[in-house]
Amino acid sequence: MIKAIIFDFFGVICSDEYWRFVKEDKFEKGKFHQLADDVNLGTFSWEYFLQRVADETGQNVSAVEKMYNSERINPELVAYIDKLHEKYKTALLTNAHASFIKPLIERTGLKKVFDEVVISSEVGIIKPDPRIYEYVLKLLNVHAEEAVFIDDSPPRVEGAKTTGMQAILYQDFNQMKSDLERLLVAGSDD
């Protein structure tokens, strides 16, 4: 029986403009992936990351900040998560730097739709490392088979599956909702 639903942030709840800005494929490893991994692990500060992205793209820091400020949260998905939260435990599990994402979560009121928010830079582990999925499961006090994880990255979906969770590859809201509701109905038969 499903007791918890765990959502990724960038590319699911919020648009992910970084990859367009740096002109790199989100799913193909390149120099901007290493920069993202390093900041998401908390290896260096958010300010240092912004400067490095600016330097590597030939832009200035304000252009990088403007790109991040242009990202948009999907209100339809947030409303759906709020509805799910009435019946299920919900969590946000994101590869991000806390200095950027925590104020955004507070400003947008997202915290109220989640029981737990796990930010990679605060725990020093990034998806798809199985330890970060195990960490959020422990916080939610559920077993892996009682949770569904939703992400737009195939390796991160596979990482969740290695822990025993069910997982959905997010392509768009309607597809995710349909896939999730199918799992929830099937899980209620247990």
Image: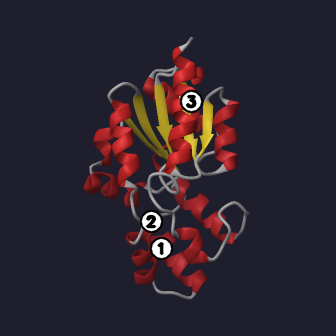
Say which quarter of the image contains residue 114.
top left
User: Where residue 52 sits: x, y (%)?
Assistant: 55, 76
Residue at x 59%, y 52% (from the top left corner): 171
- Residue type indicated by callout 1: Leu
Q: Is residue 104 visible?
A: yes
Residue kind at label 3, given as amino acid type = Arg
Task: Give how far across and how far down residue 74 sits, in percent.
Answer: 40, 55
Considering the image in quadrants, where does the C terminus appear? Answer: top right
Vertical side of 98 occupied by 52: above or below: below
- State whether residue 139 is above or below residue 172: above
- Element assignment for label 1: helix
Q: Which mark is residue 72?
A: none
Pointer 3: what residue? 182
The circle on residue 46 is 2
Give the label, 2 or 3, closer to the camera.
Answer: 3
Q: Which residue appears at 40% of the width and 28% of the height?
A: 89
Residue occupied by mark 1 = 50
Which amino acid type is shown beneath numbered disc 2? Trp
Mark nearest the camera among 3 and 1 is: 3
Q: Quadrant of residue 107?
A: bottom left
Residue drawn at 63 percent across, 77 percent down: 23
Between disc 3 and disc 1, whose residue precedes?
Answer: 1
- Label 3 SS: helix
Q: Are marks 1 and 2 in contact (CB under 8 Å)?
A: yes
Label 3 and label 1: CA atoms lie apart by 41 Å
